[in-house]
Image (cartoon, helix red, strand yellow):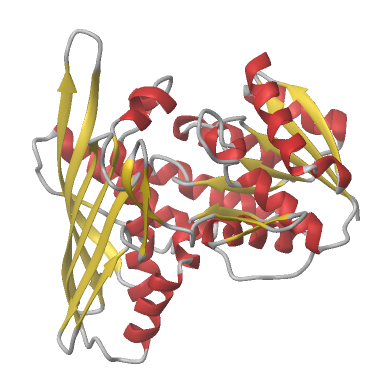
Amino acid sequence: MKIRLLILGSGMFVNGRNSQTRGVILPSIYQFLKNNSHDFEVYLTHRSQSGKEHNSKCCQFLSINDLGQIKHVKSDFSPNDIEKIVEKYQINSAINSLPDHLHYSTCKVLLKCGVSTLVVKPFVLNKNEAVELAELQEAKKVHGQIEFHKRHDHSNRYLKSEYMKGSLGDILKIDVRYSQNKRLPLDFFKSWKNFSNVFSYLGVHYVDLIYWVTGYLPTKVSAFSSRYFDEKIDFEHSFDVIIEWQLADKKFNSNFSINWAEMESSQATSLQYFNTLGTKGRINLNQTDRGIHHIYEKNGLKHINPYYVFEEFGQDQINYSGYGIESVVSFLNNITNKKTEYPSFKEGIISSAVIEAAEKSSKLDGMSVKISLGEKI
């Protein structure tokens, strides 16, 4: 079967726009097509001419046109326009890399059209929307996958393996600290940062990981947000969140400290620490310092993480690997009938419910908000 793959969005995650990278999605498609012989047509969307130029520049760098048919399609990303594109080009698969607040409406129209869909995290921003999309995906019998790439990170897989074999005992407490350069929301996400928040964009990774590692479900959330404001800037830069988790009669709390307030001169784009304490042991994951320290003439010391996306230059070729690449490639494997384990829309109900509860709690000055998942999971 010919795969007609629609890519929604033309931002940094697609093509590395306004960064020193090629992003994640186009390198993943390049690597997949390079390693597999499949009949692929890829439809890259753009709203503006600059979006088309960024997509074209990345495709040219990768020589991806030699591996599959690449077509450029203009879109305003409204559900009606997406439906017309799907019908016109007979699209059967899509990767949705639009801003967070557009995920629900755009995933809904894709599913209604019978299109298998990978959506970047977060899935959607509230539980009811997540339930509706999960039920629609199941009814349409198509793939519905969330790009939670941290499930592919070997450090997180190590944590899960050690927990499963019992070396941690029962979980007593989990601490998450995750901060990113403040220029990301101010420069890269400035058009939509006020429609989402740093917890739903960054913290959601570790909400999903805690569920995936332990099997516990969230029952209660308390959240406190902090705002940055001057004459030109006003946005929530930090979230401190406490989540209660439960499995049968066992409970533990996780503490999240998430922010978009890190200094531009910081040693890494993302500072990430994931610490788990159990009755039999502790595992601390320093996901900032991966052991590679690169000192630049102008920018000083930087901690490099090649395990997310590794762009490896050879004599006459480039290869891409890493858990970011693996996450997108797993979807490409799924739509070409090589079944792999993946974060489903149904599992996305959990993190969406936590996002919604955290937003409500922050507006109530940290008052706890209960989560009821019922029989949905």
Tell me if residue 373 can be seen: no
Which residue is situated farthest in the front direction here? 297
Tell me if residue 221 can be seen: yes
Q: Is 36 located above or below residue 125 in the figure?
A: below
Q: Is 221 located above or below residue 170 in the figure?
A: above
Q: Is residue 210 left or right of residue 22?
A: left
Question: What residue is at 90 percent from the left and 52 percent from the top?
Answer: 39
Question: What residue is at 17 percent from the left and 18 percent from the top?
Answer: 229
Question: What residue is at 60 percent from the left and 38 percent from the top?
Answer: 14
Q: Is 161 located above or below residue 299 in the figure?
A: below
Q: Quadrant of residue 163?
A: bottom left
Question: How far from the left and from the top, in percent, is residue 71?
Answer: 83, 31
Quadrant the N terminus occupies: bottom right
Q: Quadrant of residue 7?
A: top right
Q: Quadrant of residue 300?
A: top left
Which residue is situated farthest in the top direction here? 231
Taking depth in this image into account, of 322 and 231 the one nearest to the observer is 322
**Label total for image:** 0
Quadrant the C terminus occupies: bottom left
Taking depth in this image into account, of 40 and 308 the one nearest to the observer is 308
Question: How far from the left and from the top, in percent, is residue 53?
Answer: 69, 22
Question: What residue is at 48 percent from the left and 56 percent from the top?
Answer: 148
Question: How far from the left and from the top, in percent, is residue 269?
Answer: 35, 44
Q: Is residue 153 left or right of residue 93?
A: left
Taking depth in this image into account, of 336 and 53 the one nearest to the observer is 53
